[in-house]
Amino acid sequence: MLKEAIDKIVSLTTEGVKPSVFRPDPEPGHVYYLATADGRVERREAEPSPRKHVVHDLVSLAALAGDFAPDPESGELSQLACWYSRGGFTLLLDDQTRRDRVTLPLTPSPQMTILEGWARQVTWLEQAKLVQTLRIYFGRYLDSQTPVETFRRLKFRQTQAGEKAVEHGRSSIGRSLEAELTGAGSLPAELTLYLPAFAGPLAEVFTTVRLLVEIDAQAERIALVPDGGSLDGNWARVEEELAKRLREALEGIECGVYRGVP
């Protein structure tokens, strides 16, 4: 079969049709044949495909970095470079070619994903939905179950009095129509969460998030808003922790460390 394939290339060449590349089925995928203008057929082997390794922990990433690091006694300059961000780590095995790389992707935890949504836009939730969200996603990251029970016991009531307002923190909840909250006195003005930044790899990296409690008594809904309306500060501190862990993992290996994406 291989002979037939070569004969086909030769015949095409002599007929004036000059295919630049032909890959016979019996050969491995990296082997190809090149027909030259003078009718010769050359067997060639393609360069290996770039390495695109994906690891699941820093130990494995550091192990690969060590495998490709030059011998310290050789005097050869290391071409290793590692980049980090909230999206993960990328190790370039040769920063000159930037072809071969090892990645450790990071995924935000479900909790941080929810909070990112609340930071982008104030999200008003009905009482039952809020209690469910706190219990399922954030219960274990609160100091106690007290905030969840406090929200559960809240009772909204509207009357036609029109004057009375219920105070929560420093803001007035009531408007022209009386909106009264039973149990508002024990409602916290803010919540503090200590939760994982990532799911999967590096799930042990935690961050502290402060949530401000906002209440729309007339519409009987509640919103929890990240303090400052953004989690950028949290992610910056998380990335500082990533840099620390990366440098510890690469200790003894000559490798540049950079914040960002290559």
Image (tube, rainbow, N blue to C red):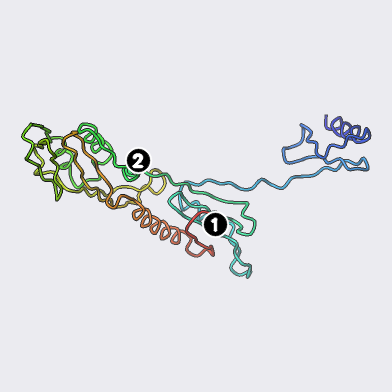
Q: Nearer the viewer, residue 245 or 127?
A: 127
| Observer-nearest of 202 and 226 | 226
Q: Left of 62 or right of it: where is 149? A: left
Does 255 appear above or below 24? below
Q: Residue at x 41, y 58 (%)?
A: 245
Residue 110 is labelled as: 2
Amino acid residing under circle 2: Pro
Task: Say which residue label 1 marks.
Answer: 65
Look at 25% across and 45% down and name the residue there. Answer: 141
- Crowdedness of circle 1 by 10 Å Cα count: few (<14), some, many (20+)? many
Q: Which amino acid lies under the numbered mark 1 shown in the image of this protein?
A: Ala
Looking at the image, is mark 1 or mark 2 earlier in the sequence? Answer: 1
- Which quarter of the figure has residue 149? top left
Please, what secondary structure does the residue beneath circle 2 have?
helix
- Real-space CA distance between mark 1 and mark 2, rounded to the nearest whole angstrom: 31 Å
* Image depth: mark 1 or mark 2 in front: 2
State left or right for residue 163 relative to residue 171. Answer: left
Indicate the position of residue 201 as horizontal and vertical percent values: 42, 46
Q: Residue at x 55, y 50 (%)?
A: 102
The answer to whether residue 125 is left or right of residue 250 is left
SS assignment at label 1: helix
The quadrant in which the N terminus is found is top right
- Residue placed most toward the observer, 187 or 229: 229
Up-down relation of residue 39 to residue 92 (above or below):
above
Instruction: Using the image, tell me which numbered label, if any, was put on residue 223.
Output: none
